[in-house]
Image (cartoon, grey):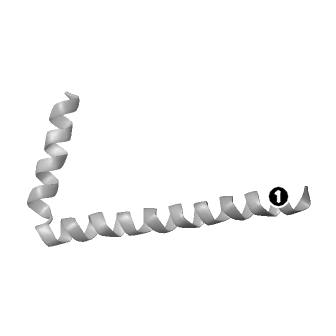
Amino acid sequence: MRKLTLYSITIFTLLTLTSCEAIETIFKAGMWWGIILVVAVVVILFLIFSRGKNS
C-alpha cells in the first residue's frame, strides 16, 4: 500500500509539473537548505571562537 501511494504521488507530480517547474522547485529547496547550513556553520564557528577567547 505504501509503494502504491508513493507511485501515485510521483505520477501525479510528473503529470502536473513540467520539467522546468520541477527543477525550479528542487533548486529553490536546495538554495534554502544551503543558506540555512551556511548560517548554522558560521554561528557554530562564532561560538567556538568566542569561547576560546574567554578561557
Numbered disc total: 1
Q: Nearer the viewer, residue 28 or 39?
A: 39
Q: Which residue position is annotated with label 1? A: 52
Q: Is residue 36 above or below residue 10?
A: below
Q: Is residue 40 left or right of residue 54?
A: left
Rendering coords of residue 7 (x, y %):
14, 41
- Quadrant of image for the N terminus: top left
Task: Farthest residue to the right: give it.
Answer: 55
- Quadrant of image for the C terminus: bottom right
Residue at horizontal 72 percent and vertical 65 percent from the top = 46
Kind of residue sitting beneath label 1: Gly
Q: Nearer the viewer, residue 26 or 48?
A: 48
Rendering coords of residue 22 (x, y %):
20, 65
Element assignment for label 1: helix
Q: Nearer the viewer, residue 4 or 33?
A: 33
Q: Name which quarter of the figure residue 52 lies in.
A: bottom right
Residue at horizontal 23 percent and vertical 30 percent from the top = 2
Rendering coords of residue 29 (x, y %):
36, 64
Residue at horizontal 76 percent and vertical 62 percent from the top = 49
Q: Is residue 46 left or right of residue 22?
A: right
Q: Nearer the viewer, residue 11 or 40?
A: 40
Whether residue 18 is visible to the viewer of this picture, yes or no, is no
Whether residue 53 is visible to the viewer of this picture, yes or no, is yes
Q: Is residue 30 left or right of residue 2?
A: right
Q: Name which quarter of the figure residue 16 lies in.
A: bottom left
Q: Is residue 27 above or below residue 3?
A: below
Q: Is residue 49 above or below residue 21?
A: above
Residue at horizontal 67 percent and vertical 61 percent from the top = 45
